[in-house]
């Protein structure tokens, strides 16, 4: 399964198999999207460069988007 995330407008956008699933404004929202799409800890998640430069996409500081994704995937850890 190809899972892709990107930062945009202070949210994390999720795509699975090149289909847009949605955008989450909190790690808990993203965790729900992960769970609904059977994405679990240990699975490869590909990231847009916008994750690295998230401060240009509405996040407070560089690294915030990566932490957001990490928190979300840890919430669905089995």
Image (cartoon, helix red, strand yellow):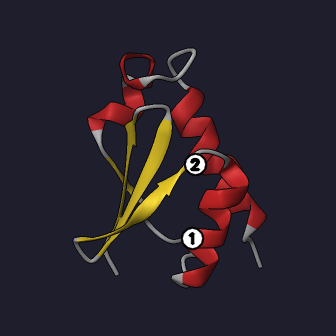
Q: Taking 12 as reference, is 40 left or right?
A: right
In the visual, does 18 lie left or right of 70? Answer: left
Q: Is residue 68 above or below residue 41?
A: above
Q: Give the total number of marks visible in the rendering.
A: 2
- Judge depth for marks 1 and 2 and give the one in front: 1
Q: Which mark is residue 33?
A: 1
Examine the image and state in which quarter residue 46 appears: bottom left
Q: Residue at x 63, y 78 (%)?
A: 35
Q: Which mark is residue 13?
A: none
From the top left corner, tell me how far across and down residue 17 is, in percent.
27, 77
**Residue under numbered circle 2:** 69
Looking at the image, residue 33 lies above or below residue 50: below
Distance (Cα) linking label 1 and label 2: 11 Å
Crowding around mark 1 (Cα neighbors within 10 Å: few <14, some 14 to 19, many 20+) is: some
For residue 20, which quarter of the picture? bottom left
* Crowd rating for badge 2 (residues with CA inside 10 Å; few <14, some 14–19, many 20+): many
Residue placed at 55% from the left, 15% from the top? 61
């Amino acid at each position: 399964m190809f899972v892709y995330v990107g930062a945009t407008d202070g949210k994390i956008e999720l795509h699975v198999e090149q289909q847009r699933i949605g955008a989450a404004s909190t790690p808990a929202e993203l965790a729900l999207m992960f769970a609904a799409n059977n994405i679990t800890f240990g699975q490869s998640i590909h990231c847009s460069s916008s994750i690295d430069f998230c401060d240009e996409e509405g996040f407070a500081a560089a690294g915030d988007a990566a932490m957001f994704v990490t928190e979300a995937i840890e919430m669905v850890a089995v």
